[in-house]
Amino acid sequence: MIVRIATEKRSGAWHVTNQGDVSWYEFAREVLIAGGFDPDKVAPIKTHELQPPRPAKRPFNSVLNNSGLKNAGIDLLPDFRIPLKRLVSQLQQNERG
């Protein structure tokens, strides 16, 4: 993907993320699921409830958009859960030694 963007001499900022829009809460649940843990151990909270509070105001929706890739005809990355499961599995194997 990066090689194609570079060799085709495309300019600009490119947002490249795996597919699947989730909140930080939903992402945390997916991490627990991938590790074989109970996702109900995570509870959602509002940004203003964070302690300590965030130093900068956060946008309501900060999901990155892959429309540049789509418009360029570049294949999109798979759903984030696929590499997440692989990563969590590798981390668990490393922990076991």
Image: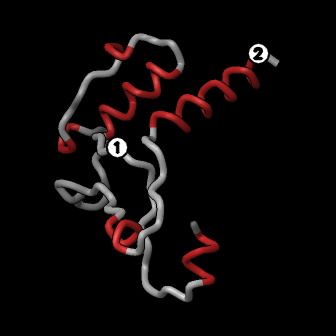
Looking at the rendering, which quadrant does residue 6 occupy?
A: bottom right
Categorize mark 2 by other alpha carbons within 10 Å: few (<14), some (14-19), many (20+). Answer: few
Q: Is 7 on the left-hand or right-hand side of 57?
A: right
Residue visible at 45% across and 41% down in the picture: 80
Which residue in the structure is indicated by mark 2?
96
Which residue in the structure is indicated by mark 1?
20
Near-viewer residue (24 or 85): 85
Q: Single out the residue that lies furthest toward the right.
A: 97
Residue 84's label in the rendered image is none
Residue visible at 20% across and 37% down in the picture: 49
Disc nearest the viewer among 1 and 2: 1
User: Where residue 74 sits in the image (x, y, percent)?
Assistant: 47, 66
Residue visible at 31% across and 62% down in the picture: 65
User: Where residue 19 sits in the image (x, y, percent)?
Assistant: 39, 48
Q: Is residue 64 above or below residue 94?
A: below
Question: What separation in Å lies between label 1 and label 2 (alpha carbons)?
Answer: 30 Å
Residue visible at 61% across and 31% down in the picture: 86
Q: Is residue 65 above or below residue 11?
A: above
State the SS at label 2: helix
State the SS at label 1: loop
Q: Is residue 97 above or below residue 90?
A: above
- The quarter of the rendered structure image containing the C terminus is top right
Q: Are marks 1 and 2 in contact (CB under 8 Å)?
A: no
The amino acid type found where label 2 is placed reads: Arg
The amino acid type found where label 1 is placed reads: Gly
- The quarter of the rendered structure image containing the N terminus is bottom right
Instruction: Count the numbered circles shown.
Output: 2
User: Where residue 72 sits in the image (x, y, percent)?
Assistant: 41, 74
